[in-house]
Every structure is written in C-alpha cells, then in structure tokens.
Amino acid sequence: MGKEWLTSKEAARRLGVSSATLYAYVSRGLLRSEGSNGQRERRYSADDVAGLKRRRDVGRKAESIAANALDFGTPVLESALTLIEHGRLYYRGWDATELARGSALERVAQLLWQCDERPFDPKNLPSMSTALRQAWQAAASFAAIERCLLLLPAAARWDHPSWVEDRGAMLETGVRILRLLTAAVTGDQPNALPVHEQLAAAWNVPTDRAPLIRAALVLSADHEFNASTFAARVVASTGANLHGSTIAGLAAINGPRHGGLTRRVATLFDSLKVEADPEAALAARLADGQDLPGFGHPLYPDGDVRAATLFALLRETVANAPDLAFAERIADAGERLTGRRPNVDYATVTIERALGLPQDSALSMFLLGRTVGWIAHAIEQADGSLIRPRARYTGPRPTA
C-alpha cells in the first residue's frame, strides 16, 4: 500500500494550524517535508502529520492535567476502593451508610483490604519491643495524633521487612498498626477487641451508645483522595512500608483544613454556647467575614450523607441529649444563613459532645477510621508506579 502524501494546505488543515506554523514545525525539526518531482510545492507524509498531531495533543493534555490535576474534586488516579456518586458513599460497591449501622470497622477493613478474618487473629498484636516501650512512655503526655506519630517508627523497626512481596504479611502489619494506634488513643495496652468497643470502654460510654462510635469510625474509613490519603498513597508509591504511609496520613490529617477541622467546630460550639442569642452571634460572625467550620462539602452539594446518617443515629440513641439539641439548633441556623448543611466534622463533634467524650475524641475517631483507608490505598498502590506529577512552572524564564 502506497504512502499517503499531503500538500502544505492539507497538512496545515489536519494539524489545525496556519501555513506559517506548519513551516515553523519543519524548521524546528518537528516535521519533515520532501520535494515533489522537481515542483516547488513541498509534500508531507500523512503518517508524519498524524504522529505530530498525537504528540502535540498529548503535550496539551499534559499541560491541562498539570494545571488542574490537584484542584479540589478533579480525578487524578484510578482506584477501586470508594465511590462518591449522586450524593452517596460506597466502599467497593457497598453503601457506607448501611455498613455504618451494622458493621464494625474491622469488617469494613476486610472489605477494603479484600481479605478474610485471618489477619485479625487475636494473637496478631504489636510486639512491645524495648524501643516501643520507651516510645510509649515518652508519648504518655502527648495528644493522640502526636502519640501515634511517635509510636509508629518504633513499631516499624521490628515489623515484617518484606511486606510488599508478601500480601499476608502486609495485611497482618495493617492490623497491628490499627491496634497500636487504637491503644495510643485509649492509653491501654494493645488488644484484639473491636476498635469501637475499646474506645467505648476507655471513654466510659454505655454499651447501648457504643454504636455511635462504631458508625463514626466506619463513615470515616475512606473518602477517595482526600489530602491525608493522597499523602499516604504517594509515600506508598515509593515502596515505603505501611508504617511510613500511615505516618504521612497522620501528618496531613492534623491540619486545620482536614481532620483538624473538628477542633475548629468544637471552638465554634464553645463560643456560641455562651451567647444569649447563638443565632444572632452566628449571623454576626458571618457578617464579619468569618467562615463557618463544619458546614458544606463540595462533593455533597445536597448535604454530607455521612453527617445525615450520624445525626439520624444520634436522634435514635440520645434523642434527649442537650448537646444534640444545641447542635441541631446551630445547624438549622447555619443552613438558613449560608444554604450549607453540616458535614461529617460537625457530626462527629456532636457525637463527642452528646456522649460526653474527652476533648479531641472526634479527631481520634476520624484518624482511627481513616487509618483503615490509608492502609487500603497503600495496598492498592503497592503494585503501581511511582506517583510523580510534573509542575506547571510559573516563575521567571531563564534569560538568553
């Protein structure tokens, strides 16, 4: 089959450029042209033109990705873990709000990690080495996240060294990390009880109210590529172990725009509780240009389904709790003033207050639930490539 040749006009048309640009491509070596039987008119191979068009389109696509890939809500990687669609949240196709009503965090971990109960053997506990015991003592006075960040490197020192090559070892390591961080939050020695039962016991929560903690954990388990999960996944892509990925997630979750937002919601509650007219104080806050932490979520324009589920469970479990009534009063006022509904941070702080939990318990529930998600993403990324995006340079260009 003979090669197809194009005139300059045909080549320019296929590339969508002017004749002057076409000639510039030739002068820069991006496109070859040939003479035609002694004629002045040059000709161009259709295959060469098509190849240049593909390369140019890829370049434009790459520039577009670089400009927008890290914008909120723009997909950047493939994942089979979590779907947020039509205002709903699903873990591997299972409705997360239904799981929150009947499943422990460990069951959700099995779902996200695609494993059975074997890694959760009661004997699979962190080894309390000398280094870990020393770290435990040193971290005794720290806040929960800081305790977790100090304990993980000490635990990693004696954990399985080849977790990437051995899926069973990797899953067992994930369980040990979850149990270690739970112990770091409760202050008790690591054990194999379900996470929500350990928290309920440490926080003196009656058995009939423990399902609220369980639901908060489950609904915090994963939320695709939020900041902490993306950080954990980037670290996993380097081949680092699960401890390293979890440390990255913990460092990110502590920020006030992510998990640390619960502290801002708690501060909002405290400031409004002392007001004679909380609604008026809320309106004045907004009029003063201050934001309203705990309200709205870009991925749930009609309201955060996680928060709606937790509030429904609160009404079923502690309907007469004064702190629930106050939180709902503020939620109603906030929605009237802004059009935004409470999100999961607002709801977990409400659980903290309605159950009389220790300060920062909302953040502790969030970090323990999300630990399951970080590990799931690290496992999913283990067989993938290095995550290394390019920068879209906006600084000064070099001088000639």
Image (cartoon, helix red, strand yellow):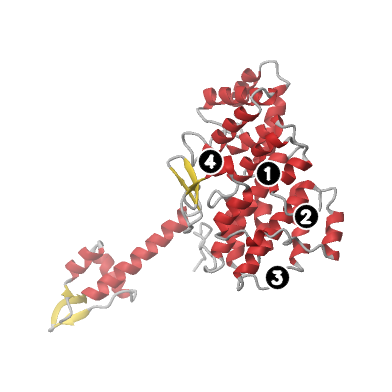
Q: Which comes sooner in the sequence, label 2 or label 3?
A: 3
Disc 2 to disc 3, how far (Cα)? 18 Å
Q: For the point 64% across and 26% down, which residue is it?
A: 327
Looking at the image, residue 390 sits to the left or right of residue 128; the answer is left
Q: Which residue type carries mark 4?
A: Thr
Nearer the observer, 275 or 13: 275
Q: Which residue is mark 3?
A: 160
User: Circles 3 and 1: CB distance less than 8 Å?
Assistant: no
Q: Which residue is mark 2?
A: 190
Q: Is residue 71 above or below residue 283?
A: below
User: Circles 2 and 1: CB distance less than 8 Å?
Assistant: no
Q: Nearer the viewer, mark 2 or mark 3?
A: 2
Disc 3 to disc 1, how far (Cα)? 27 Å
Element at label 3: loop
Q: Which comes sooner in the sequence, label 2 or label 4?
A: 4
Q: Judge the density around disc 3: few (<14), some (14-19), many (≥20) Cα neighbours within 10 Å.
A: some
Q: Which comes sooner in the sequence, label 1 or label 4?
A: 4
Looking at the image, residue 274 sits to the left or right of residue 166; the answer is right
Q: Which residue type carries mark 2?
A: Pro
User: Circles 4 and 3: CB distance less than 8 Å?
Assistant: no
Q: Which residue is mark 1?
A: 365
User: Circles 2 and 4: CB distance less than 8 Å?
Assistant: no
Q: Position of residue 142 (x, y in %)?
A: 81, 48
Q: Judge the density around disc 1: few (<14), some (14-19), many (≥20) Cα neighbours within 10 Å.
A: many
Disc 4 to disc 3, how far (Cα)? 35 Å
Looking at the image, residue 282 sits to the left or right of residue 193; the answer is left
Q: Which comes sooner in the sequence, label 4 or label 3?
A: 4
Element at label 2: loop
